Image (cartoon, rainbow, N blue to C red):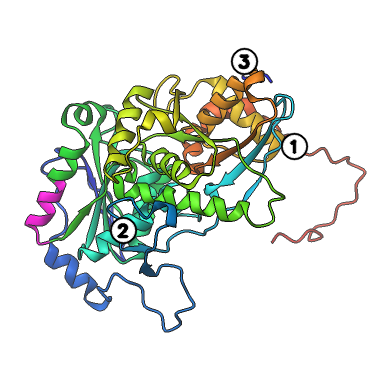
Amino acid sequence: MMISSRLFNSAPFSIISVSNKKKFRSSHYPTATAIHSIKSEVSMDSTPKTNDTSFEFLCKKPYTPPSWAANLNPIPSHVFSLGQFPTPIHKWNLPNLPKGTEVYLKRDDLSGMQLSGNKVRKLEFLMAEAVAQGADCIITIGGIQSNHCRATAVAAKYLNLDCYLILRTSKALVDQDPGLTGNLLVERLVGAHVDLISKEEYASIGAVALTNILKEKLLSEGRKPYVIPVGGSNSLGTWGYVEAVREIQQQLGKGSGGITFDDIIVACGSGGTIAGLSVGTWLSGLAAKVHAYCVCDDPDYFYDYVQGLIDGLQAGVSSRDIVNIQNAKGLGYAMNTSEELNFVREIAKATGIVLDPVYSGKAAYGMMRDMAENPRKWEGRKVLFVHTGGFLGLYEKTEQITPLVGNWRRMDVHASIPRKEGTGKMF
């Protein structure tokens, strides 16, 4: 195969211009009194109400772990139903695979529309804790096109909570309106409060300190914020993909024709997904080897970070024994070579599967390159690739992708074809 801080607030129910604040620390939000008066006519019970208990979507329910995970500690008490699960598994007809190799897709990109991708599984547990603690708003942080931040903003609004996002951007753009491209469009449509921070400030201050600054500010205004870390990747969020392993087991037991997977492959950006997948696979006896392709930092960093997450669950296992992490960062996080983007285009054209450029696109690129370079290692193996979503991230890459696609022309209609005004109805 050829491997080619600035605040932007919108008042509810009104349209206002975006304000340009000069200093991150001087940015101010509506007071708690103002917000609560706006919401006085809206139920402040964050649990959606329904008279029909058969409707499970957006409901909080007690959580019972798989039997093989019962010794992990602590076990979440509740979970919110936020995603469209189970997500499908189907064969992925990739070209130029090694002899006898079969690749299947776990479609976590289909876990919802606005609220989609792997982040939904983590948020089901994180939002349940936020509601249980009486939070009235959520704080989280990430890159300017963070899928996690978009998913968190939507989930918060589903549960009648405000959402505050700290988004990392370039120094040249930190004082400008961030626009409406990709994830930003959804975040701003659902009314998330956006603070911009430069990459340089982010690197020198850190995500934990930045979210704490905002948390203290909101506390001083009488709010009750709940902080979710980068990517939703803490030990509680890890349960999302422990639960995903149970889902995969159940799918394999229903009409799979006796298929078992030798390998599970997934992208890694913050560590929570691979922590849950690897510890769940290890505990469940699924007997598949988990491979992660990291799209930022490096494998050693993620081995250590994942170790911290699984130690937080008292799993009693070394991360290096349950997951193989390889580097797929390339030029850097959310940066792509033309070869990587052309790979995304080729896969879409060949199979109909659209990969995002930041996570699954780089992971699939790394997988296919390894298969091309080391075919004997993969011959005869059945591989499950977890598509973690992120489709909206493609919109930021349109300038780079445009020269790669073409496929358009003006239709040539000969002059002899009869024409009569009003014949064609324009619907």
Query: Residue at coordinates 41% horizontally, 42% vertically from top-left?
Result: 279
Locate the C terminus by quadrant. Answer: bottom right
Drawn side of residue 126 relative to residue 147, left or right: left
Residue, disc 2: 76
- Closest to the camera, between mark 1 and mark 3, is 3
Query: Residue at coordinates 52% horizontally, 30% vertically from top-left?
Result: 363
In the figure, 366 relative to 111: above or below?
A: above
Which label sits on residue 373?
Answer: 3
Residue type beneath disc 2 = Pro
The stretch in magenta equals 214-222
Residue pushed farthest top?
A: 373
Drawn side of residue 335 relative to residue 95, left or right: left
In the figure, 18 relative to 221: above or below?
A: above
Residue, disc 1: 410
Percent x, y of residue 333: 39, 27
Label 3 secondary element: helix
- For label 3, count other residues whose C-alpha is less than 10 Å away and answer few (under 14), some (14-19) or many (20+): few
Q: Earlier in the sequence, mark 3 or mark 2?
A: 2
